[in-house]
Amino acid sequence: MNAIKTRQDSDKTVIYNKLKKEVLFLGDDTSLEKPVFAIWEITSKCNLNCVHCSSSDLEGEMTKEECFKVIDKLDDSGIFWVQLSGGEPLLRNDIFEILSYLRKKGIDTEIYTNGTLITKEIAKKLKILDVDNINISLDGLKQSHERIRGRETYEKTVEGIKNCLDENLDAVLTITLMKSCIGDLEKLLEFAIQKGMDKVKIIDLMPVGKGDALYKKEMLNKNEMKNVVKILKKYSDRLLIIPEVPYPLLPTSLIMGTGRISGSC
């Protein structure tokens, strides 16, 4: 974790700092004394094989009962917001029981998903459980997206977005900025508007997992970043642009699929 923070600090966390300063909205107080939300890699299993994936291939995934115990600890410690990620969280056959238990404890929850598994039935269940945000990854138009995430993924992801919106779920278009697909950025923002989405989350490429090998090649240079900021500012009156803060910089607990918990660096 320290290595990640050091490496991102050396790049001055370009995307987060630029967007925070020039586009929107985040507050300046990051001096909280203890974690207030948790990022939970609830599984390392995934139905895709994305070239920039930062997830670890972990063994010994927690049982449902162990997950409940973790939730109890989160509740006792004052955590009020949990991001469920992976892997692909929707691959867990007990994911809805876990979501239900989080809601029972009064913990707000969002999911990070590739969207390909969100059928109409899944979307209805997510709505019933009142999941706060469904963050769905779409990194480019069909050619760019499928180069990153695999063949025949684009249409499935778009269908997953549609199913969420049909249930009035808060679907958030989540874009990992990479040099090879930033040419699609403006069209992705237009896509979000046309679909009736009101939020877009911008994620910094992490030098972790498979992303480590791509980091130098795919990280944006200053001119590319300036162009990205220009585009985002153009759309900031129609979309809430959310720069995803790199988790080592936040008052966050990071929970791995095996149950190991670490605080922010």
Image: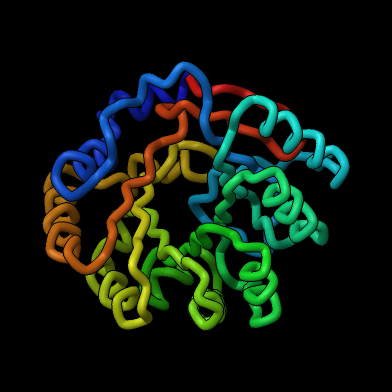
Whether 229 is drawn above or below 118: the answer is above
Counting from the top left corner in percent of width and height, residue 20 is at 22, 41
Counting from the top left corner in percent of width and height, residue 68 is at 80, 41
Whether 253 is drawn above or below 232: the answer is above
Q: Is residue 227 left or right of residue 98?
A: left
Residue at figure coordinates x 72%, y 49% from the top left: 104
Q: In the orientation shown, which residue stands out farthest toward the top?
A: 33
Looking at this view, is 199 or 186 the one in front? 199
Residue at figure coordinates x 32%, y 63% from the top left: 181
Q: Is residue 223 left or right of residue 64?
A: left
Tell me where residue 257 sits by quadrant: top right
Colour convention of the picture: rainbow
Counting from the top left corner in percent of width and height, residue 121 is at 70, 80
Q: How many marks?
A: 0
Looking at this view, is 257 or 74 the one in front? 74
Counting from the top left corner in percent of width and height, residue 30 is at 35, 25
Residue at figure coordinates x 65%, y 57% from the top left: 88
Looking at this view, is 235 or 230 the one in front? 235
Residue at figure coordinates x 81%, y 34% from the top left: 69
Whether 114 is drawn above or below 70: the answer is below
